Image (cartoon, helix red, strand yellow):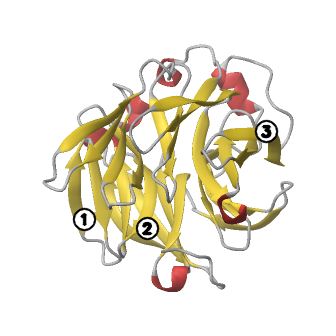
Amino acid sequence: MTVRSVADGFSFLEGPRWHEGRIWMSDFYTHRVVAVDDTGRVETIAEVPEQPSGLGWLPDGRLLVVSMHDRKLLRREPDGGLAVHADLSELASWYLNDMLVDDAGRAYVGNFGFDLMSGAPMTTANLILVHPDGRAEVAATDLAFPNGVVLVDGGRTLVVAESFGHRLTAFTVGADGRLTDRREWAGFGPAPESTDITEVLGQLNVVPDGICAAPDGTIWVADATGRRAIQVAEGGEIVRQVDAGDTHVYACALGGPGGRTLYLCTAPSFAEHERRHTREARLLAVTLDAPAGGE
């Protein structure tokens, strides 16, 4: 498998989603949501001053965007303007993070839980459920940096990446979108016990960041410190991996013709002070040797 560059010149990419023939992503420090076609042409879709992250769509086609710093979920209206869909500042203890929006328009939003960029002691965080009408509630607690979220088993199971928990955690999804039956979907080693983020990172074999589901029931995981994306089966077996070379992988998405393209959001590091004023992030892609799903 040959990894190719699709587009570059970004600050830090997150939240990739294959939608209407393009990859849509958030570029953190240029405060933009962008859409990129396979020729590398970049279109700015929205500007989010408080830093965009997770993306998803309501059933009527309107885009939802996580606004990280003010802890709000925004909705892009048909005229291109942004409206507040939900204010999550009372439910999220620090900046908002990645998000999944299901077919019914329910959004599941993670948050940092603590001031990662300043090196504060690590604390756990909530996963928040936002109903289609904007009502919000806590869906799950005590997650170690809830990050990428996917649905598997025909939408009956939600899996969230706990980046600093060394695992993917699963829940059963009820008819009302609420989560029960918490369990480990895949573990990569013992969970760190330290609250010092430097010590925590040193104890992790895999740092699961952004994730995306494949139709065979496996999950692709961006390994934020491993410079790779790994395809993981339930239970934790790594069945395939894509190496990104000399850069780190922070998010991934499936799409492209036949759903056979794995897109990778990459950058040399994640630290804000190193990425804010640089434009070294790249969107990479690899064509897989078997159908992998996509829209």
Q: Mark 2 belongs to which amino acid?
A: Trp
Residue 189 visible in rendering: yes
Please give the name of the residue rendered at 52% of the width and 85% of the height, measured from the top-left corner: 258
Image x and y of residue 77, in percent: 21, 50
Q: In this view, does 120 lie above or below 68?
A: above
Mark 1 Cα shell of 10 Å, populated few (<14), some (14-19), many (≥20): some
Q: Name the residue under label 3.
A: 182
Nearer the N terminus, badge 2 or badge 1?
A: 2
Q: Name the residue under label 2.
A: 18
Closer mark to the observer between disc 3 and disc 2: 3
Q: Tell me which residue sits at (72%, 23%) in the image.
A: 199
| Residue sitting nearer the eye, 207 or 26 | 26
The x and y percentages for residue 260 are 56, 80
Horizontal and vertical percent position of residue 90: 45, 17
Give the residue at mark 1: 42
Q: Kindly give the residue lying farthest to the front in the view shown.
A: 175
Amino acid beneath label 3: Arg
Q: Which of label 3 and label 1 is nearer to you?
A: 3
Please, what secondary structure does the residue beneath circle 3 have?
A: strand
Between the C-alphas of marks 3 and 2, the distance is 28 Å
Amino acid type shown at disc 1: Val
Disc 1 element:
strand
